[in-house]
Amino acid sequence: MATIDLGKVALVWKGTYAAGTTYESKDVVQFTDSGEVSSYIYVNASGASGQTPSTGGTVNTTYWNKMAGGAAGIWASGLAMGSAGQIVKVNSGGNALEFGSSGTYSVHAFDQYANSAGMTDSQSGNPDYIDISGGKTVSFTPTSTDDIIYFSHLCSVQWGNYSQGCDVYLMMKAGSASIGSGDQKLNYSGQHAVYTNTLTDNYSVISKAFYMPCTGLTVGTTYYVEQAAGKHGANAVQFNVNSSAASSVIGSGADNLRSHYVSAIHYKKQT
């Protein structure tokens, strides 16, 4: 019975192109031209050596067809094993692969303080900054400008039977817990944020929460944050007003009463 030679019926991987090797139809090689690593298939009916797959980006189509290509490093070396939660993505230059963030965040650190020391402010002139923290602060240190800080804070207030406005907000300072009126206001809503014009004693709990991205902050620098107040009108406003029925934040003790409370949760982007 006669034997029929079908020749190659599948692609044959030959590795990196070598000028001294004779290649035949359906041989596949890897070749770097102008910094681009690509794969080429030999298409000439006759075997030959010394026929470079491409030169200066121009494929030697008499002997080769380009199958696939990419920038140096993608096809040749690949990537080493990354860390848990990472994804493979194209870099900012669009010419290589790299490991990057999956876009999720995890809790990196947590801080809080409470202050039950009542404070009455009777000054006129509509002050924007009233120190009601008793020198207490929360702090955080960015590990990346991608970090996010979640703040939650509240304060109990009381004013008498007159028209009056007030607000509580956060003040931040880099590198020092000595915070004053000239430091950065984070979420000040204005002196009339909470307002009354009824002729009876008024009580309120002002509560706020917000996410603050660390964009623009200095990585590795510790930032300190306190709760402060502002008010409109010459009459007195009491801040950090305690109630015997108030629940504690943690454990027991006057300083844990929910009359003035600040927390900061530091979220770090997974990389």
Image (cartoon, grey):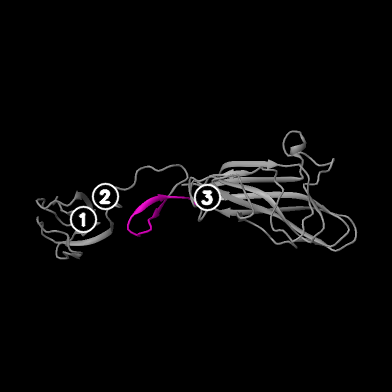
- The amino acid sitting under disc 3 is Asp
Lower sequence index among marks 2 and 1 = 1
The quadrant where residue 117 appears: top right
What is the C-alpha distance between the residues marked 3 and 1? 40 Å
Lower sequence index among marks 2 and 3 = 2
* Residue at 70 percent of width and 62 percent of height: 190
Label 3 or label 1, whichever lies nearer to me, is: 3
Is 256 placed left or right of 177 in the picture? Answer: right
- Position of 90 relative to 259 (above/below): below
The part of the chain drawn in magenta is 88-104
* Residue at 18 percent of width and 64 percent of height: 56
Label 2 or label 3, whichever lies nearer to me, is: 3
Which numbered disc covers residue 268? none
Single out the residue that lies furthest toward the right.
Answer: 200
Would you name the residue on which mark 3 appears?
147
Which numbered disc covers residue 76? 2
- Position of 109 relative to 192 (above/below): above
What is the C-alpha distance between the residues marked 2 and 1? 9 Å
Badge 2 vs badge 1, beta-carbon distance below 8 Å:
yes
Is 192 placed left or right of 70 in the picture? Answer: right
Secondary element at tag 2: loop
Would you name the residue on which mark 1 appears?
32
Residue 206, percent from left and from top: 75, 53
Secondary element at tag 1: strand
Q: Based on the picture, tell me whether residue 98 belongs to the magenta stretch.
A: yes
- The amino acid sitting under disc 1 is Thr
Is 113 placed left or right of 123 in the picture? Answer: left
